[in-house]
Image (spheres, helix red, strand yellow):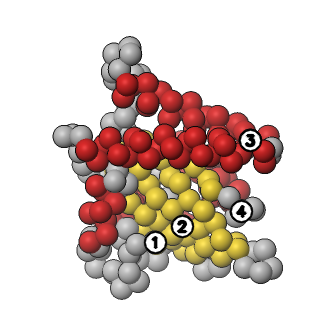
């Protein structure tokens, strides 16, 4: 996680500005041994519902306080699933921000394990994808390169999750590579566009 451990006052670290320029609105870290989460300011606003909680140790209920009610149980199961084996996890869900209302976010992260195979830490990033396709309807005309890219991202997430469920390792890596390539291109376009997410 990019926040330093002494960011108890909720001040936004300088690294958050660089991440925002790349389309990433926050970073997160879960300590599975201590069962606490720590967020950057942007992640705290969207996942915990309060940017002032940045840099603090948050119990699971506090850490997910900003997650949309209908998505909490599913997200908890996905967090647990991520601790059962190595690899990159990509999850899309909704959050309820005090400042921005209901948003859609894409969380990408990796879990690390000790020599006994026990999960120790999961770290990752949060990308606010609300502006890309807020309510499931395309916001751009047919044939628009950006609209097609957003559609590809949605299908990429669905394909990755379906392939992951099959547990076929030969398909996971190419699916992951495709999804991350799409994500990087979206982040690049968002960072260069005149319209900012926040």
> Is there a contact, CB below 8 Å, between mark 1 and mark 2?
yes
For the residues labelled 4 and 1, the Cα–Cα distance comes to 18 Å
Give the crowd class for mark 2: few <14, some 14-19, many >=20 residues within 10 Å.
Answer: some
Farthest top residue in view: 142
Residue found at x 54% / y 67%: 123
Vertical comparison of 75 with 42: above or below: above
Q: Which mark is residue 123?
A: 2
Give the crowd class for mark 3: few <14, some 14-19, many >=20 residues within 10 Å.
Answer: few
Q: Which mark is residue 9?
A: none
Q: Is residue 100 left or right of residue 74?
A: left
For the residues labelled 3 and 2, the Cα–Cα distance comes to 24 Å
Name the spot of residue 92 as percent of width and height, x first: 52, 44
> Is there a contact, CB below 8 Å, between mark 3 and mark 2?
no
* Residue underneath mark 4: 86
Residue 192: image quadrant is top left
Q: Which mark is residue 1?
A: 1
Q: Is residue 51 left or right of residue 171?
A: left
Name the spot of residue 91 as percent of width and height, x first: 56, 47
Vertical comparison of 27 with 168: above or below: below
Q: Is residue 128 left or right of residue 173?
A: left
Using the image as rendered, state which of residue 197 and residue 35 is in the foreground.
197
Going from N to C along the chain, the mark reached first, 4 or 3, is 4
Going from N to C along the chain, the mark reached first, 4 or 1, is 1
Residue found at x 38% / y 81%: 4
Vertical comparison of 152 with 113: above or below: above
* Residue underneath mark 3: 171
For the residues labelled 1 and 3, the Cα–Cα distance comes to 29 Å
Give the crowd class for mark 4: few <14, some 14-19, many >=20 residues within 10 Å.
Answer: few
For the residues labelled 1 and 2, the Cα–Cα distance comes to 6 Å
Going from N to C along the chain, the mark reached first, 2 or 4, is 4
């Amino acid at each position: 996680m990019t926040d330093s451990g002494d960011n108890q006052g909720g001040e936004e670290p300088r690294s958050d500005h660089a991440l925002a320029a790349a389309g990433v609105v926050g970073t997160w870290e879960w300590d599975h041994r201590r069962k606490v989460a720590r967020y950057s300011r942007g992640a705290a606003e969207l996942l915990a519902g309060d940017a002032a909680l940045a840099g603090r140790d948050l119990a699971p209920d506090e850490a997910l306080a900003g997650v949309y009610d209908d998505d909490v149980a599913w997200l908890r199961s996905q967090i647990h699933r991520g601790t059962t084996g190595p690899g990159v996890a990509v999850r899309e869900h909704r959050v309820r921000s005090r400042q921005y209302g209901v948003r859609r976010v894409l969380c990408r992260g990796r879990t690390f394990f000790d020599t006994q195979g026990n999960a120790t830490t999961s770290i990752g990033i949060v990308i606010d994808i609300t502006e890309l396709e807020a309510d499931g309807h395309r916001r751009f005309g047919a044939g628009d390169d950006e609209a097609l890219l957003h559609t590809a991202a949605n299908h990429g997430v669905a394909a990755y999750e379906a392939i992951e469920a099959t547990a076929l390792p030969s398909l996971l890596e190419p699916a992951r590579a495709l999804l991350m390539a799409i994500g990087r291109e979206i982040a690049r376009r968002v960072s260069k566009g005149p319209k900012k997410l926040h």
